[in-house]
Every structure is written in C-alpha cells, then in structure tokens.
Image: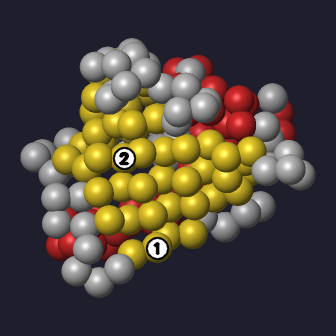
Amino acid sequence: MSKTELITEPNSPRLIVRRAFNAPAKLVFRAHVEPELIKRWLGPAKYATEVETLDASHGGQYRFLHRDDEGNEFAFRGLFHGTPSVDEGITQTWEWEGLPGHVSLQKMTFEETADGQTIVHSDVVFQSAEDRDGHIAAGMEGGMNEGYDRLDALLIEL
C-alpha cells in the first residue's frame, strides 16, 4: 500500500495531497465519480457511507453521508466546477457540514505513470491557514489515509 503524502506550508491556506495507486487512471477516476464505488471506499471503515446526491457535471452537486454504529451522522457536500474527466481531473468545493461555511476548493488530477500506477494529486485551498490546520487537527489525515487504503483494496477487486 502507498502512503498518502500531505504537504503544507506555514501561513498558507493550501494543502497538497498525493497518493499512488496500482491501477489505471480511468479506473481510479471512476472510483471518485461513481456512487456505487464511492460508498465502498470513502472515509474510515467504521462508517457506512451513503451517496445521497452526485451529479458529476458542471454546477452539479454532491452530498456524502457517513454514519457510525450509534447512528451519528457526518455529512460532506459541494459543487463541481467544470465537468469531471480523467484527462481534466475534478474541480469541486468541499464542505463538512459539521463546520458550515468553511468551504475549500479542491483540484484533483489523475496522472498515469509509465509503470501503470496512477498518482492522484489534490491541491486544496482553504479559506485560511487556520481553517486548513483545523481540518487536519480534526482527523482529516487519518480519515483520508484509511479511505485511500480502502480504495487500494477496491481497485484490486475491480
């Protein structure tokens, strides 16, 4: 399994995230835009994931819901900017409903390497460095790592 790399700079609202997957770019991209695939890997395994809404088109919306065994719910939502594609990537806003109004903008690309791996590169811009740091402190990195580990396993099945 590959390790997720998070890169931050002091006093910057940006977060760079990189992860390599042993699968073609088209397959990794599909896992980011198809509801039946998203719910199988997004977030920590302790949560059941529901894709309530997903319209992967310019101006389209999405809303994902994580639910734990005790019935607690954690929802995320956003809008697509441009039409997602494996060649152009995905540009979207991202908002955790637990911190309403703290919206980030994410540009994700899918780079296929000569050896058949795909590097997912995400450039996320938060409203401030403090906002970015707050999301990281709230467990974003752990959830992202576990979700991407689950995506690794899913890609092997596909």
Instruction: Read off the residue under disc 2.
Output: 106
As drawn, the residue found furthest toward the right would be 115
Residue depicted at 37% across the width and 31% down the height: 64
Q: Nearer the viewer, residue 102 or 111?
A: 111
Q: Position of residue 88 (x, y in %)?
A: 53, 33
| Count of number-bearing discs | 2
**x, y percent for residue 66:** 39, 38
- Crowd tier of the residue under label 1, counting other residues whose Cα lies within 10 Å: few below 14, some 14–19, many 20 or above: few
Is 102 drawn above or below residue 50 in the view shown?
A: below
Image height of 8 relative to 156, above or below: below
Farthest-out residue, left:
101
Res 127 → quadrant: bottom left
Secondary structure of the residue carrying tag 1 is strand
Q: Residue 60: percent from the left, percent from the top? A: 32, 18
User: Does residue 80 appear in this view?
Assistant: yes
Q: Is residue 150 visible?
A: no
- Furthest-bottom residue in this view: 10
Instruction: Tell me residue 139's x, y (percent).
Output: 38, 66
Residue wearing tag 1: 7
Q: Please state if 127 lies on the left or on the right of 78 as rendered.
A: left
Q: Residues within 10 Å of mark 2 (few under 14, many from 20)?
A: many
The structure residue drawn at horizontal position 21% and vertical position 72%, both measured from the top left corner, is 129
Mark 1: amino acid: Ile
Quarter occupied by the C terminus: top right
Residue at 29% across, 57% down = 125
Q: Kindly identify the residue that appears in the image at 73 percent across and 63 percent down.
A: 2
